[in-house]
Image (spheres, rainbow, N blue to C red):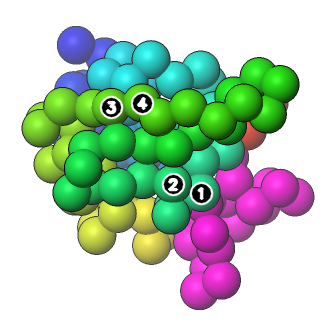
Amino acid sequence: MLFETALNHQNASYARTGVIIKLMFASGLRVSEALGLPLNAVSLNKKQISVKGKGAKERIVFFDDETKIILQNYISAVRGYFATSKSTFLFPSLRALDGHITRD
């Protein structure tokens, strides 16, 4: 699968992309929702994410055990390549004005 190829790549950007794709497939998140997630919206223990969708409506989405492991690995091993000490986003960007990667 596409996300597995990206996850297994040595490049951190590819690995991050693989995590995003896997998370979207597992949870049903839209691209903009996934990219703008704050780190504190993710509960690994409960395997759920609190997300604000269209119209600022909040909902809870769930993910599976495999996605939990992938997210744990990403947060501990890859996220730091893109995050500053004050970054609050799950998928931060050092260059983007919003502080997180975008669809553009």
Q: Is the Cβ of the residue at disc 3 closer than 8 Å to that at disc 2?
A: no
Q: Nearer the viewer, residue 6 or 60?
A: 60
Q: Is the Cβ of the residue at disc 1 closer than 8 Å to that at disc 2?
A: yes
Q: Quadrant of residue 64?
A: top left
Disc marking residue 11: none
Question: Mark 4 highlights which residue?
Answer: 61
Element class at badge 3: strand
Mark 2 is on which residue type?
Ala
State whether the magenta stretch is mostly helix, strand or loop.
loop
Q: Is the Cβ of the residue at disc 4 closer than 8 Å to that at disc 3?
A: yes
Alpha carbon distance from label 4 to label 2: 10 Å
Question: Mark 3 highlights which residue?
Answer: 62
- Residue 38: percent from the left, percent from the top? 59, 57
Alpha carbon distance from label 1 to label 4: 14 Å
Disc marking residue 41: 2
Q: Do we see residue 42 in this rendering?
A: yes
